[in-house]
Image: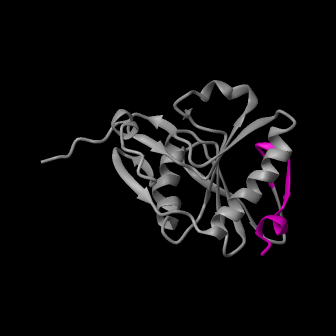
Amino acid sequence: MSVKPFTYEEYAALPGDGRRWELLDGELEVTLTPSPRHQTVSRRLQFELMRTLEEPGRALVFNAPIDLILSPHQVLQPDLAIIRSDRQALITERGIEGPPDIVVEILSPGTRLLDQRLKKGVYARFGVQEYWMVDPVGGQVELYRLAPAGEFEIEQRFDRASHLTTPSFPEVNIELARVFRA
């Protein structure tokens, strides 16, 4: 007997129980509350992106929790999502409805495999052009770009001594030592 996949409508009707729910391939997933280190790195990275992209009006930067609705059976909660200003039509009262230009996931022990495998595949399948996986403990960022074949390919790796740059936004030049400092 097969189980009917959950839909966005059923997901949206879940009671507000304080947990962070996601809908992946029609299955409900719940993740643990992020650690203080995770939140610190996320907040610092968001600050740098907002200063570089949002304040000058180049893009909007969103942080979790926000629904990223990719289909009726795919609703994710990325740590950060970046959308070019000329693509603001993706932003609705429900959340972000369509692929952002960049999705950032901050790895945690409880979500590492989910972020590295399942979510990465979903983001590629729905046309997210760039995906960053941030390791807050190791002080590293892996930047993936969507290849013509529809899968992510590693573009660059950055360590805490690097400056994070991206071809999607040439003005981005983030000193990662500031993001990963203790």
Depicted 175 relative to depicted 5: above or below: below
Q: Is residue 139 left or right of residue 5?
A: right
Depicted 94 relative to depicted 158: above or below: above
Q: Position of residue 178 (x, y in %)?
A: 84, 66
Identify the residue shown where x is 53% and y is 46%: 123
Is 2 in the magenta?
no
Q: Residue furthest left?
A: 1
Q: Is residue 136 left or right of residue 69?
A: right
Q: Position of residue 9 (x, y in %)?
A: 36, 33
In the image, 14 versus 126, the foreground residue is: 14
Q: Is residue 170 visible?
A: no
Identify the residue shown where x is 59% and y is 68%: 35
Identify the residue shown where x is 61% and y is 53%: 79
Magenta residues span 165-182
Q: Position of residue 163 (x, y in %)?
A: 85, 62
Depicted 69 relative to depicted 41: above or below: above
Is 167 in the magenta?
yes
- Image quarter of the C terminus: bottom right
